[in-house]
Image (spheres, rainbow, N blue to C red):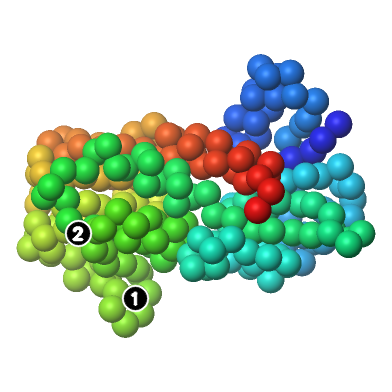
Amino acid sequence: MDKYGLVGYPLGHSFSRDFFNKKFRNENIDAEYINFEIPSVNSFPDILSGNPDLHGLNVTIPYKEKIMAYMDELSEEARQIGAVNVVRIGIRNGNIFLKGFNSDVIGFTRSISPLLTPHHRKALILGTGGASKAICYGLRQIGLDYTFVSRNPKEGMLDYSQITADIINEYQIIVNCTPVGTYPHTEECPELPYAAIGNNHLLYDLVYNPEETLFLRKGRERGAVTKNGLEMLTLQAQAGWEFWHSKD
């Protein structure tokens, strides 16, 4: 039986495990999908050596960047983004050969593009982790400007205390790439001047549990278009399956 899996810590509820095991049942694929919850990326080689039938992995927080050191090759997107969330496991010259990909950018751009209108030209990206790198790459692909917002901003970024009503009016797309608002902390949301949000805004949250975060609810109550990260996850999972079975 072929094996696939998810590497991260902590994992808790796993969208990927549910998605792929359901896919395997529905399509009569002789495979299983396993969660590999490891407290250190240093345990990654143990996963490979202990699971010789492993053909592909997804990677999530906090290892999307750290896992890159173990790759033998990177796709162009993964190299430019600086984060890997899909690993294809193969054999080359008798040795395990790992290629890293990034499917987050595919899931995000395909999910957000139908919601964009001509006045959506600039985006605030909340957070600076591995997922946010894919988001900024995707925004560039579809021709949009962006600025990062961080609790610990580097040069060219904004601190949350700097987000004024004027900035909210200028940046009419807001993408939350932080875990703030994720279950069970459902009464938390990024610190923004929500009163400045209106019906020209688009709020996109990579969080999908709960279905509507407080961030999205506050935007919806002020007329903004809102979307959670579930479709993005589904699209990036489908892209990951394609990466595992591609020949490039």
Nearer mark to the viewer, of 1 and 2: 2
Q: Residue furthest bottom?
A: 155
Q: Residue at x 39, y 61 (%)?
A: 137
Q: Which residue is identified by label 2?
A: 122
Q: Residues within 10 Å of mark 2 (few under 14, many from 20)?
A: some
Residue 153 circle label? 1
- Residue located 49% across and 68% down the image: 80
Answer yes or no: is residue 46 visible: no
Give the residue drawn at x 69%, y 42%. 245
Which quarter of the picture shows residue 112? top left
Give x and y (percent) for residue 95.
Answer: 88, 61
Quadrant the N terminus occupies: top right
Horizontal side, residue 21 vs residue 176: left or right? right
Up the image or down, 104 lies above or below 163; here it is: above
Give 41 or 116, whichever is nearer the viewer. Answer: 116
- Labelled pair 1, 2 in contact (Cβ < 8 Å): no
* Residue 38, x across and y down, in percent: 73, 55
